[in-house]
Amino acid sequence: MPRIRLALALALFALSISSLIAQDQQSPGDAWMEAYTQNPDQLQQQYFPAAIRMFLNGTYVQGAYTLGVIWQQSDWKLQERMVLHQAQPHVEDYLYEIAEYSSSSGTKIAELCIWNLKDEKPLKEFEFIVPISGTLPKAEVLDPYREKWMELCNAHKVSELVNTLYAPQTLYYNHRPMVKGRKALIPVYGYMESPQYSLQLTPLAVVPVRSDLILELGQCSGSYPGKYMLVWQCNEKGTWEIILDSNI
C-alpha cells in the first residue's frame, strides 16, 4: 500500500510539473495567431493602437491598422508559432518575447516582440520580424561587446558608449516616442553619467537568426533591476552594433 501511495504521489508530482511547463509556454501570441489564420481582416484588433513594426534599415511603421495590412499583404503564409523565450520587464504590464514561425514555404521566421498586458486582452505593441537564414554565428561572439558596453557604462562615458556600440540608425524604445539615432540617444542615457550609476548585463537568451543578426533578452542588475531587449547587427567592418535597445 505505501508503494501505491508513493507511485500515486510521484505521478501527481510529474503531472503538476508538466502543467507548469505547459503554462510557461502559453503566450498572448496564441490569440494573435488564431486571428491571423481564421480572421486576418481583424488582425489589427490584436495590436496596441500605436503599435510599431521595426525594419532592419532602422525605419519603422506605426499603427494597428497598418501592421494588420502588412501581414495581410505579406508573401509569408504562417502555419505555426512557437515561443522560444519570454522575459518580464521591470514594468509588469509588459512581456518581452522571442518567437519563431513556420511557414508554408518552409522558411522559418524569427520575431522579437513586446506585449502590452495592461488591459484584459493582451495586445502586441512592438514587433521585429526577420527570416532565419544563412550560417548562424555563435552566441559567444557578443561577449566582448557586452563587456565593452558595461565597461563604458560604468565608466560613465555615455557618448563613447553610444558612438562605439550603437548603429548610426539605432532605435531606442521605452516609455516615450521612439528615439532614433545616436545623437538623440546620448541625452536619453545621460543619467549614466552619475558617479553612483552602475549596471551589469546578464544575457538570458541569445538567439542568432542570420549570419549578421542576433536577438538578445537579458537581466540588468545594479542601478536598474529590470530586463533588457537588444537586436545586434554586424556591420560591413565586421563589428557588432546595437540596432534596437529596449528596457521597459
Image: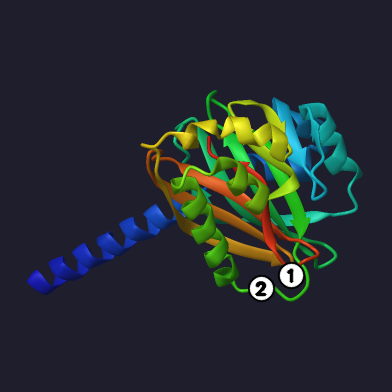
Q: Where is residue 137 in the image (x, y as percent from the top left)?
A: 66, 73
Query: Residue tagged by mark 2?
Result: 137
Q: Is residue 67 above or below residue 98?
A: above
Q: Tell me the quadrant of the picture where the N terminus can be found.
A: bottom left
Residue located 58% across and 26% down the image: 175
Q: Which image quarter: residue 178? A: top right
Mark 2 packing: few (<14 Cα in 10 Å), some, or many (20+)? some
Quadrant location of residue 50? top right
Q: Is residue 28 visible?
A: no
The residue tagged 1 is 211
Q: Residue at x 55, y 71 (%)?
A: 140
Residue furthest to the bottom = 135
Residue 17 higher or lower than 48, as above or below: below
Q: Can residue 152 be seen in this view?
A: yes
Mark-to-mark CA distance, 2 and 1: 6 Å
Which residue is depicted at the point 60% across and 53% down?
A: 98
Q: Residues within 10 Å of mark 1 (few under 14, many from 20)?
A: some
Q: Is residue 148 found left or right of 38 in the rendered image?
A: left
Q: Is mark 2 on a helix, strand or loop?
A: loop
* Callout 2 amino acid: Pro
- Residue 165 pos. (x, y %): 64, 53
Q: Do the residues labelled 2 and 1 touch (CB within 8 Å)?
A: yes
| Kind of residue indicated by mark 1 | Ser
Q: What is the quadrant of residue 113 in the picture? A: top right
